[in-house]
Amino acid sequence: MNPYFVWESFDGSAGWRPFADLLDPDVAAARVAASRQALAGMFGLELDALPERVVASVLFLGYASRLVSPPLAQALEGSVPDVGPDDLWWREVPGGPLPVAVHLDGRRPAEELSDVVFGLVDPLEDVFARTFHLSSQVLWGNVASALGGAAGQLDGAWPTVAGLLQRPPLKGMAAVSNGRLRRNNCCLYYRIPGGGTCGDCVLTRD
């Protein structure tokens, strides 16, 4: 479909780093610094115009999309990959979706999608919350937004996403209505000069 739904098969080749590296605050800070530099170039801004925590929120949203999109798509086929943080690897790239590779040993029933999604996202959310002083409402709202973005590209995914949004810590972060998701919080992207607002943003009206 698109790169957000792709997990490569981990082959042990050079360049892949364990997912656990992203849970190191220093590595997370380095990734945010790289994204900050890239956004400054994209928008023609000085770094001072891009608050670190705003860039961290936007980067986390991208990472969340990479973690939740493949399991959501596969849940619609009747099962989900039996994976956790120790089964994933990532590779540095200058821009675009983060490449992710997986070592897959088995599968789980589709009904266990929430366990897989929360198991992958929760450790990363904790690191970004502590390192960049981001609230759980912002970060779990980003996870909800990532699920909504994926659901918008999959036939029949909205009921599954609506069900996930009824489970803590996603409960209250967003709602699904008429085939679209509406957040109850904001990813902070609007604070980037020229960034604007997202289609599911709480700051905009229908």
Image: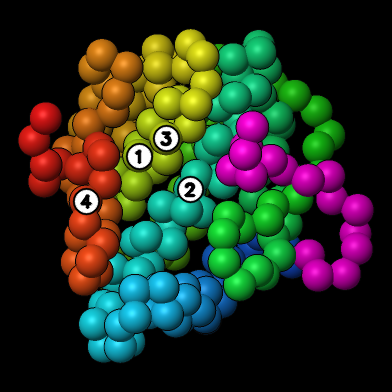
Foreground tag (2 vs 3): 3
Residue 189, visible in the rendered structure: yes
- Asked if the stretch drawn in magenta spans residue 4, the answer is yes
Q: Determine contact: label 3, label 1, CB under 8 Å.
A: yes
**Amino acid type indicated by mark 1:** Ser
Real-space Cα separation, disc 2 to disc 3, in angstroms: 11 Å
Real-space Cα separation, disc 3 to disc 1, in angstroms: 6 Å
N-term-proximal mark, 2 vs 3: 2
Real-space Cα separation, disc 2 to disc 1, in angstroms: 9 Å
Local SS, label 1: helix
39 versus 158 height, above or below: below
**Amino acid type indicated by mark 2:** Ala
N-term-proximal mark, 2 vs 4: 2
Query: What residue is shown at x 91% (from left), y 53% (from top)?
Result: 11
Residue that badge 2 annotates: 64
Residue that badge 1 annotates: 145
Real-space Cα separation, disc 2 to disc 4, in angstroms: 18 Å
**Amino acid type indicated by mark 3:** Gly
Residue that badge 4 annotates: 197
Query: What residue is shown at x 26% (from left), y 78% (from top)?
Result: 51
Crowding at mark 1 (Cα within 10 Å: few <14, some 14-19, many 20+):
many
Crowding at mark 3 (Cα within 10 Å: few <14, some 14-19, many 20+):
some
Tell me the chief SS of the magenta region.
loop
141 versus 111 height, above or below: below
Q: Determine contact: label 2, label 4, CB under 8 Å.
A: no
Crowding at mark 4 (Cα within 10 Å: few <14, some 14-19, many 20+):
some
| Label placed on residue 149 | 3
Q: Determine contact: label 2, label 1, CB under 8 Å.
A: yes
Q: Which residues are magenta?
A: 1-16
